[in-house]
Amino acid sequence: MIRMPLATASLLAIAISLAGCGEGKDKEKTAAPAPVSSTAAAPAAVGNVDEAAAKAVVAHYADMVFAVYSDAESTAKTLQTAVDAFLAKPNADTLKAARAAWVAARVPYLQSEVFRFGNTIIDDWEGQVNAWPLDEGLIDYVDKSYEHALGNPGATANIIANPEIQIGEDKVDVKDITPEKLASLNELGGSEANVATGYHAIEFLLWGQDLNGTGPGAGNRPASDYLEGAGATGGHNDRRRAYLKAVTQLLVSDLEEMVGNWKPNVADNYRATLEAEPAETGLRKMLFGMGSLSLGELAGERMKVSLEANSPEDEQDCFSDNTHNSHFYDAKGIRNVYLGEYTRTDGTKMTGASLSSLVAKADPAADAALKADLAATEAKIQIMVDHANKGEHYDQLIAAGNTAGNQIVRDAIAALVKQTGSIETAAGKLGIKDLNPDNADHEF
């Protein structure tokens, strides 16, 4: 997945302009965000924020991270149950239920993406769980019109059809489809488009390719692709069944791992390390995650690239047409972190010490501005959700010639750009001059 840096406030418009130069699946993948320095309004003096109050904010943030990943794990297990029911009796109803469980599982996970950029333990792990876009020809059959990433040696390997695949001069044994084997195939042949695991691999296996371009309709894989015996379609159904079961099992175990990293009262996990560090470190990670997801990732890679290329191949949930929800809950995650709020999947609302409370004490106007910008962004993306609910999905909004649809996406991008500037201003009010945790001077 391409990851763009959090630009400084003075370079926001340039960064978004550059983000629009996407070329579809042949684009060059880039590294993690580069270090940057905030150029927001002059920061408050170091030491302006009470350490105990800041510590409380970081502790509540850790509670939220644990809750979000716990919900992601729980909904992934529900997905696993639905997949097992589908495999036990493949038909239209059980396939519909499995798809619905996948959509539901995305809700908490997407709200976790804001945690990624500041916490390397998450960013290093995330590729196995949520990497995109992927060359689905690595996994299963694809239509003859399929356009894969240029230079990808595994783009048409088709693991499901072949117990041994050829990658350049190397042959790879994939006879046994296990979670461990699938994990080993990510970035096969050095291509980041070779994604064998995670939510989007499961999405492809449940929906199949969306062959509608920028027209209405999502993927329409038949349940018979998973039948055994009479009526089966797709071919190699025993291996497709094994793949879906194994990749779902791996998703659950990956989420269990991340829950463990954030479990409270564990002496040697990542959370304990974070809470033992100066509070400034945690605040910086929170703000860096908010800004990076807001600008480079969501406004840039996930919206501007697909819009400028008019490319459904570059939309986030391209098989299921769930992209509107993905954008909405990504943005919701940013707002959650700032307000210290999270609504759990059981309806319970978490609240506690927040970045907002710290910024409001330092500069009430800066806090009010950022809260207004976060609300405005959510409202702009809600328009995408409303259109999808009426039948016009994200891939239709970005179609060439859809002037009104394009403008809906542009308005959301502009709102994200604006809120990123307010995030940097808020950081400055807390005395945080450099948002990149790797560049921290560790003064507060």
Image (spheres, helix red, strand yellow):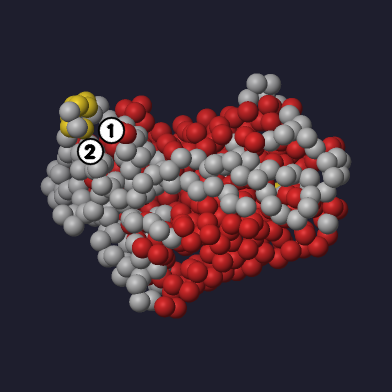
Question: In this picture, is 284 found above or below 208?
Answer: above
Instruction: Tell me the residue that label 2 is attached to.
Output: 153
How far apart marks 1 and 2 lie (CA) works out to 6 Å
Q: Residues within 10 Å of mark 2 (few under 14, many from 20)?
A: some
User: Which mark, residue 189?
Assistant: 1
Residue 65: % across, % down:
63, 41
Residue 148: % across, % down:
25, 49
Residue 234: % across, % down:
17, 48
Q: Please indicate, yes or no, whether residue 327 appears anywhere in the rendered image.
A: no
Marked residue nearer the N-terminal end (1 or 2): 2
Q: Nearer the viewer, residue 382 or 240?
A: 382
Determine the secondary structure under disc 1.
Answer: helix
Q: Amino acid at mark 1?
A: Gly
Label pair 1/2, CB-CB below 8 angstroms:
yes
Q: Amino acid at mark 2?
A: Pro
Say which residue appears at 75% left-offset and 50% top-offset.
Answer: 428
Q: Nearer the viewer, residue 404 or 216?
A: 404
